[in-house]
Structure formats: C-alpha cells, structure tokens
C-alpha cells in the first residue's frame, strides 16, 4: 500500500495575521480566576484555531473558549490522529508574560506531526497562536511563583473515513489553563511490569495522543491503590526504566545525576534537557545511560542511590517518595526533595525571570498588533 505523502508547509513561511472573533475582549473582561486552579481543571477564556485544507494553512482565529464541532467519524477520534504539546506562560511580578523554550516545543510538535505523516504547523503559525492566547489572557494569568498559564497546542485530523490513511483536513488549536503550583507532596510511584507504554519504532518519543491510552489502565490502578503515577519499563525486556506516564525520571547516585538515555521510545522532555544543562552549570555530573529498574531498587536499598525525582512542564521537578511493586513491596529513597528542590528552584527562577537566563530560554509573548 502506498504511503500518503507527508505534506509539509515550509517553516516560517510568511502568512497573514490572525483574526480576532467578536466577544474575545468581553470574555477576558468577564473572566474571574477561581480560587482553586488545580492542573487543567480551569479553562482560559480564549482559544486559537487554524485549519489546514487543500495543502495549506488558512488564517488563524482567536475566539472565546467554547465547544468545537467535529465529524463523528473524524480520524482523530478513531485512529488517534492527534499530536500535542504543553508549555507555560509565566507572569510572576510583571504585567506581561513570557514563554519558556517555545521553539523546542515547536520542533517537537513538528517531529510528532512528521512521525504521523500529518502536516507540520509552521513555526510562525505556532508562535502566533501562543502569542495570541497568552497575550489575550495576560491580565488573568495567575502571578504567584509556581503558578502559570499552561498552553496546550494540538493538531488533529478532521476527515471522516475508516480507510487507514491520513486525513486530508486538519485543525491546529491552542487552548490554555491557568494552573497552580504543583504541590501535592512527593509522588508515590507504581512500577508497571506487565503493560507496555511505548516500544522503539512506535510513537513513544513523540507527543502523540496514542501514547497515553496504553498507560491509562496502569494509571487508574495506581490511583485506586493510593499511588500517584506509573513507572514504565522498556517494551522488549521489561528491564530498563523508561519514564513515568508524563514525566521523565532522574536518580541521584553519589553526587551524580543519572537519567535513562533516550532510547527511541522515551519522550525527550524539554524539562529533562533543561535540568541536564542546569545541573552541569552547577558542577554536577550528569550521566545518561540505560538504567535497569532492579539496579535502581538495589541502590535505593543499600543507599548508593539517595534520591529519585521526576520532571516535566506540568510538575516542574517532583520528588518521588516511594516506588512500589504490584505486590505492595515499597522502596523509599532516603532523601526526598533535596537535589530536586535545588534544581526546581534554579529552573523556576529562570522560567519566572527572577534569575539571569544564560541559555536564552525565555521569550517574551509578542504584543498583539495594534487594532
Ligand atoms: C510531556 C511529557 C514529558 C515531559 O516533557 P516536557 O517537555 O518536559 O514537558 C515526559 N514524558 C511524557 C510521556 C510526556 O508526555
């Protein structure tokens, strides 16, 4: 069967500015930030959308947040023809927000789209969408340290049909959520030794929606047992640590930071990459290597591994309090949130522009074009 040809719109191609639909200013003016934000529970007042048809992207539109219509047979719904991103806009102690490494999110979205043979969202369109949503929401972005506006860009196939090929029509959207500092204590992790999240050659290294469905059974079981999240092992031998369902993992051995090397199925987290750089800036040794689960548990047992933590845009850096087997045996690192706390503060200070940004990671949200 002939593969559909991926249709790639050149990155950075000049394009027309987005439209602002009626009601956007009113939706922002009416918006009241609730007391409790949680993570993804509260929606921002606006959203952005651009559609792709006949080989090109149409102009984007910023609208009040609301329901969308989708054909019940759309391939996004049946075949998971959907890729997404996640990043935050920070506005701590200032009136205008900044983003953190948005071009890395764009590059990853492009790689995800290419893996699924979907059209690539041009860099300019991606940035325009983030600027439109974060700019319009600026007055309602919560401003305490740790709080942010979480931005969720996503690209999905909208054409109906059961033939196993790509859609010929797509939508790119950005929705957003004001979010709280993630502070639910140390993570309680279950080691998943039966189910598999992602195999080399599959889509694990991309932010494809298809990665998360296989993790739901283990996640739900973990929650039902009083744990927070599942830890995934490699698909072939169930021996090497991959990552948590939505976070990468680090372990502290002596003075060094160890993290599983990207094996082709692990999601290359931007937080992971940032922590590696920050740790090296601080003079810490960082080792990327295959990390067997049994070695980690033995090292926690005899103290060679003092601390384990997770990282991702949502949680930033989250300490791990315990790793548990299905039979209930628990392994608790002796230190919780020591190295993790130091790295979290260093990263957050850059993200929130409270510290110098030697790597040039932050970027101002563009001011909206004058009306
Ligand atoms: C998004 C995600 C991460 C973290 O990536 P960041 O770029 O740091 O937010 C890690 N693992 C999985 C499976 C993810 O989906």
Image (cartoon, rainbow, N blue to C red):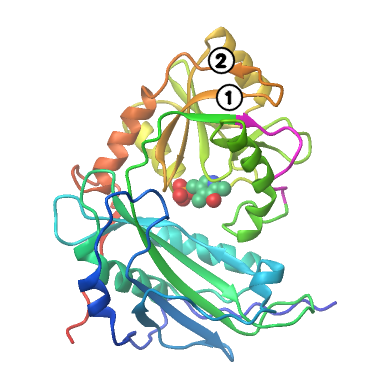
Q: Position of residue 299 (x, y in %)?
A: 58, 14
Q: Quadrant of residue 235?
A: top right
Q: Is residue 208 left or right of residue 366?
A: right
Residue picked out by circle 1? 323
Can you see residue 117? no
Name the secondary structure under disc 1: strand
Determine the residue located farthest toward the right in the rendered image.
1
Between the C-alphas of marks 1 and 2, the distance is 10 Å
- Image quarter in which the N terminus is found: bottom right
Residue 53 to residue 1: above or below: below
Name the secondary structure under disc 2: helix
Residue found at x 61% / y 52%: 205
Number of the label disc, if any, that sits on residue 300: 2
Residue 94 to residue 254: above or below: below
Q: Position of residue 209 (x, y in %)?
A: 61, 60
Residue found at x 31% / y 74%: 132
Q: Residues within 10 Å of mark 1 (few under 14, many from 20)?
A: many
Asked if the magenta segment contains residue 131, the reply would be no
- Image quarter in which the C terminus is found: bottom left
Residue found at x 28% / y 52%: 360
Residue found at x 29% / y 87%: 22
Residue 107 to residue 276: above or below: below
Q: Is residue 244 left or right of residue 286?
A: right
Q: Position of residue 245 (x, y in %)?
A: 58, 44
Q: Residues within 10 Å of mark 2 (few under 14, many from 20)?
A: many
Which span is picked out in magenta?
190-200
Proximity of marks 1 and 2: CB atoms separated by less than 8 Å = yes
- State which tag comes first along the sequence, 1 or 2: 2
Determine the residue located farthest toward the left in the rendered image.
94
């Amino acid at each position: 069967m002939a593969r559909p040809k991926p249709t790639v719109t050149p990155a950075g191609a000049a394009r027309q500015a987005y439209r602002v639909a009626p009601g956007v200013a009113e939706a922002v003016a009416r918006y009241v930030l609730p007391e409790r934000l949680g993570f993804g529970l509260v929606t921002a007042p606006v959203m952005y959308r651009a559609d792709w048809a006949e080989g090109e992207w149409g102009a984007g539109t910023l609208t009040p947040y609301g329901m969308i219509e989708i054909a019940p047979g759309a391939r996004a719904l049946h075949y998971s023809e959907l890729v997404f991103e996640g990043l935050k806009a920070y506005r701590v102690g200032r009136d205008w927000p900044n983003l953190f490494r948005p071009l890395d999110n764009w590059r990853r979205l492009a790689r995800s789209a290419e893996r699924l043979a979907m059209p690539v969202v041009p860099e300019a369109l991606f940035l325009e969408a983030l600027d439109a949503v974060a700019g319009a929401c600026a007055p309602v972005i919560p401003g305490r340290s740790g709080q942010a506006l979480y931005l969720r860009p996503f690209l999905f196939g909208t054409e109906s049909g059961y033939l196993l090929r790509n859609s010929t029509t797509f939508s790119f959207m950005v929705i957003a959520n004001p979010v709280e500092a993630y502070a639910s204590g140390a993570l309680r992790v279950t080691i998943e030794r039966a189910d598999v999240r992602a195999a080399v050659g599959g889509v694990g290294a991309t932010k494809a929606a298809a990665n998360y469905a296989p993790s739901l059974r283990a996640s739900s079981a973990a929650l039902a047992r009083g744990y927070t999240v599942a830890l995934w092992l490699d698909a072939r031998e169930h021996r090497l640590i991959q990552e948590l369902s939505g976070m990468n993992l680090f372990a502290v051995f002596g003075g060094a930071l160890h993290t599983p090397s990207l094996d082709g199925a692990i999601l290359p987290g931007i937080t992971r990459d940032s922590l590696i750089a920050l740790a090296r800036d601080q003079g810490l040794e960082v080792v990327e290597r295959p990390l067997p689960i049994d070695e980690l548990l033995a090292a926690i047992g005899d103290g060679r591994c003092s601390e384990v933590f997770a990282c991702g845009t949502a949680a930033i850096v989250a300490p791990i309090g315990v790793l548990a087997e299905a039979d209930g045996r628990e392994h608790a690192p002796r230190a919780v949130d020591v190295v993790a706390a130091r790295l979290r503060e260093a990263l957050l200070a850059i993200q929130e522009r409270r510290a110098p940004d030697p790597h040039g990671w932050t970027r101002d949200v563009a001011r909206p074009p004058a009306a």
